[in-house]
Amino acid sequence: MRVKYFLVGMVAATTSLSGLAACSHTNEAGGEVAPASAIGVHVKNENFLDMDVYAVSDGLATRLGTVSGNGSRNFVLDASLASRDLRIVATPIGGNGRASTGAVTVAPGQTIDFTVGPEMRNSRVFIR
């Protein structure tokens, strides 16, 4: 009798786990980060806190999304932001402070690689 209940439990657990695997997805875009007519943003979060990421242009902040702690994610910005005062800002969820790229100058087709450091003051940006 115990063997029967054990096997039923194993089948239920296996079914549940396979269902979770089927529903999982990544936040990474395949291939190029952005099309040539847009601006790509790749955020790598080396901090253990999850970060809300914003694009700030001409003083107006637009939320791009969340990057989990020790994770990364790609975003796409409209090309019209290329000629403006553009900054990418990350603020920790459940923490204080912020990380910023400072003003960046980009053109459509380029990508902003923004790495949020383990200590936010050690964040860095690279345009490619």
Image (tube, grey):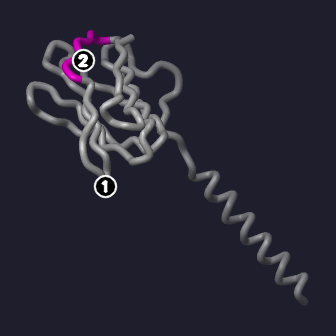
Nearer the observer, disc 1 or disc 2? 1
Q: Determine the main secondary structure of the stretch shown in magenta.
A: loop
Tell me: 85 left or right of 33: left
* Residue 106 lies within the magenta run: yes
> 112 or 119, which is in the foreground?
119
Around disc 1, counting alpha carbons within 10 Å, would you say few (fewer than 14), some (14 to 19), or many (20 or more)? Answer: few
The stretch of residues the image draws in magenta is 102-108
Tell me: 97 left or right of 124: left
Q: Quadrant of the C terminus?
A: top left
Relative height, residue 45 to residue 33 (above, below): below
Quarter of the view holding residue 57:
top left
> 50 or 38, which is in the foreground?
50
Q: Identify the residue at horizontal 33%, vertical 27% (top origin).
A: 76
Q: Which residue in the rendered view is the most extreme toward the bottom?
A: 1
Which type of secondary structure does the marked residue at label 1 adopt?
loop
Which is nearer the N-term, disc 1 or disc 2?
Answer: 2
